[in-house]
Amino acid sequence: MIPLPKGLPVCRENPDRHDHGLALLMNAADRGGCDDLERHRYVSAFGDFNTIYSTLDEFARDECPIPPGHAVRAGPGIKGWPSLTCRTDRSDGWVDVEVFALTGSSPKDKTPSGVDYSFTLHTTRERLRHDLRTFRQILAGARLWRTTVPWTPSDADPRP
């Protein structure tokens, strides 16, 4: 569950595809932007059940497109959960800030049964400072599921 600021368009997956999350366009005038997210400022939330990752570090390093040698670091976090953040300043003027969290799994698990979550802010260098405020508010209000397979309603407890 994530808080959605009022008045901003929300993009969902095509109904024919498996739903992993949503994107929130950062400009109320971008109502048609869901079909071409890369050309619009947005915040996305993505969750994948039955994660293939055993550790948060492994997940973040695999997903973060930064060059070798750059450290994935703690950053704007998700309340109650360990998280790692990476920032990518792209050559086309866009900036991506990604926050990663992993729930329900342990490095000792032979078959991880948790959920990997990624939250992304896709914005311009000019709007980064402003959009980071909204991104942090969304992260602070996010509630993640600690789940095992099979999922039961009691697993929706947001506490780690």
Image: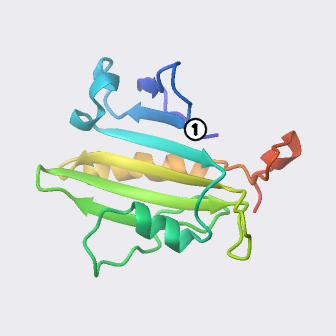
Quadrant of the image occupied by residue 65: bottom left
105 versus 40 height, above or below: below
Q: Give the color scheme: rainbow, by chain, secondary structure or one colour.
A: rainbow
Q: Is residue 63 left or right of residue 35?
A: right
Quadrant of the image occupied by residue 103: bottom right
Residue under pointer 1:
3
Q: Which sits in the foreground, 144 or 58?
A: 58
Residue 126 in percent (x, y) is at: 17, 49
| Residue appearing at x 59%, y 71% in the figure | 55
Residue 15 in percent (x, y) is at: 53, 18
| Residue appearing at x 25%, y 34% in the figure | 40
Tell me the quadrant of the picture where the C terminus can be found.
bottom right
3 versus 133 height, above or below: above
Q: Which sits in the foreground, 46 or 7?
A: 46
Tell me the quadrant of the picture where the N terminus can be found.
top right
Question: Which secondary structure lies at badge 1?
Answer: loop
| Residue appearing at x 82%, y 45% in the figure | 150
Three-letter amino acid code of the residue under disc 1: Pro
Residue 100 in percent (x, y) is at: 50, 60
Estimate how packed mark 1 is, as few (under 14), some (14 to 19) or many (20 or more) residues with alpha carbons within 10 Å: few
Residue 87 in percent (x, y) is at: 31, 63
Query: Given the current orientation, which residue lies at the most extreme front position?
Result: 110
| Residue appearing at x 27%, y 46% in the figure | 123
